[in-house]
Amino acid sequence: MQHELITDAALVSNYIKGNETALETLIVRHKQKIYSFIYSKVYDKDVAEDIFQDTFIKVIRTLKRGSYNEEGKFLPWVMRISHNLVIDYFRKNNRMPKFDNAGEFSIFSVLSDSSLNAEKSIIKEQVENDVRRLVEELPEDQKEVLLMRIYNDMSFKEISDRTGVSINTALGRMRYALINLRKIIDKHNIVLTN
């Protein structure tokens, strides 16, 4: 039987029964996806390689212990292991990962990570609320560009199309918005770092 036709669940089951090559097939099948996910968080080939190896060491230990019961959902389970190892890596290095809300990993946003404890979440929320209040004080045209750029992640070309002004005018408004925000922050003596 060709490897491609064997399900992950059957390969896991074969490996648990002692067929070592079944695990190799699983690694080869999913390496690209798992490695790419890890690399997209750490941006370092050596670190990504280490975390990838550690992921499969953990997979092997769990399977050998007989504690695997994912009912055939092998890839999401391995992805969770690699995600936790990425978090551990950042925790050890006192850095926060770049968890964007892309694709199927949207659940792994920074806020859902336990290393951002309740207190930090509250501070982050407070800062965001303060910033929103400050933005409200900006002139309407500057506020509009700032909100489109920062909250809607629109390009200046898109902003220009949407507002009917030239790209240079949109850029200018953004610049003035940031200058004015700084003035407002100074005026209120607000400290935005925690």
Image (spheres, rainbow, N blue to C red):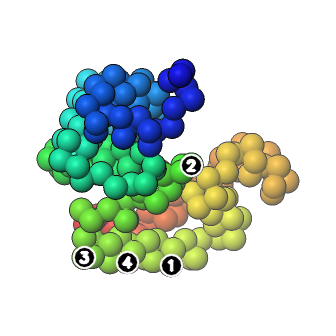
Question: Looking at the picture, which amino acid does disc 2 mark?
Answer: Gly
- Labelled disc at residue 103: 2
Q: Badge 2: few (under 14), some or many (20 or more) residues near its Cα, within 10 Å?
A: few
Q: Which residue position holds label 4?
A: 126
As shown in the figure, which amino acid type bears the numbered disc 4? Gln
Q: Is there a contact, CB below 8 Å, between mark 1 and mark 3? A: no
Q: Which residue is mark 3?
A: 119
Q: Is residue 43 visible?
A: no
Q: Is residue 11 above or below residue 167?
A: above
Mark found first going from the N terminus, 3 or 2: 2
Q: Label 1, on which residue?
A: 133
Task: Count residues near mark 3 (Cα–Cα under 10 Å), then give few for <14, some for 14-19, many for 20+.
Answer: few
Q: Earlier in the sequence, mark 1 or mark 2?
A: 2
The x, y position of residue 109, in whole percent, is 42, 58
Q: Residue at x 67, y 51 (%)?
A: 154
Q: Secondary structure at mark 2?
A: helix
| Disc 4 versus disc 3: nearer the observer | 3
**Circle 3 — which element?**
helix
Q: CA distance from mark 3 to mark 2?
A: 28 Å
Instruction: Report the Cα–Cα distance between label 1 and label 3.
Output: 21 Å
Give the spatial CA distance, label 4 vs label 3: 10 Å
Question: Which one is in front in this view, the residue at disc 1 or the one at disc 2?
Answer: 2
